[in-house]
Amino acid sequence: MTQVARTRRSLWLLPVTLLLTATTPAFADLQTRITAINGTYSTSHETQITVQPGDTISLTADEVDTDYDGNLVPQNKNVEDFTFASDSVSSDSCDPNFDCTGTNFEVTQFGVNFYVPDSIGESIVLTVQNRADGSYDQITLSNASYTPAYVPPSTSYSDPDEYPTNDAFDYNKSLIGHGRWVYIDGQRAFIP
């Protein structure tokens, strides 16, 4: 076989290689992200949000890819493609494919609700992990009521007259056990 024949014979590799390179997705750019917090969509969320004991935080996770312009493009994954965990206690994790009873998580159609424990300390870190590749995203929930002398409430009061007189009235502590706090249009509201 001559040199010219060998060169022509291997030329078919060039268009095939270019075609495969152009049509293969860039898997290295896929990232796991928390894409919505309390109904506010953002592929680049804050790393920390302020909460109160008893708040309900809704989270939606997705896998995002970076397009040619550098924009993050959601891949519309299902809630079952992720696992959720908090560092409030070692067993506080939720796998949406199974029952999350006994955790601070509740699975919804679009993600999870996290019920901030009444006994929250200074902060809690929530982790969302992609089941397929192990990549994850985190957010820190900081307790707005926390001070070095902070003591989580141990009892609930139904009548303001029962509330201890040595403390200023704090609705965050006094309503514990009577419902939950949710965010509606960015506003914190109490649901009995």
Image (spheres, rainbow, N blue to C red):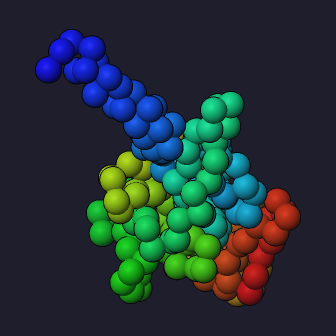
Residue 151 place in picture, x, y as percent: 51, 58
Specify whether 74 is left or right of 131.
Answer: right
Q: Residue at x 68, y 83 (%)?
A: 179
Vertical comparison of 95 with 168: above or below: below
Q: Residue at x 22, y 21 (%)?
A: 6
Specify whether 21 is left or right of 13.
Answer: right
Nearest to the observer: residue 81 or residue 187: 81
Q: Residue at x 47, y 38 (%)?
A: 19
- The reply to whether residue 170 is in sight is no
Nearest to the observer: residue 20 or residue 169: 20
Residue 97 place in picture, x, y as percent: 39, 80
Q: Quadrant of residue 60?
A: bottom right
Vertical comparison of 13 with 98: above or below: above
- The reply to whether residue 69 is in sight is yes
Nearest to the observer: residue 188 or residue 3: 3
Q: Quadrant of residue 110?
A: bottom right
Q: Residue at x 43, y 65 (%)?
A: 82
Vertical comparison of 122 with 28: above or below: below
Residue 35 place in picture, x, y as percent: 63, 54
Residue 45 place in picture, x, y as percent: 65, 44
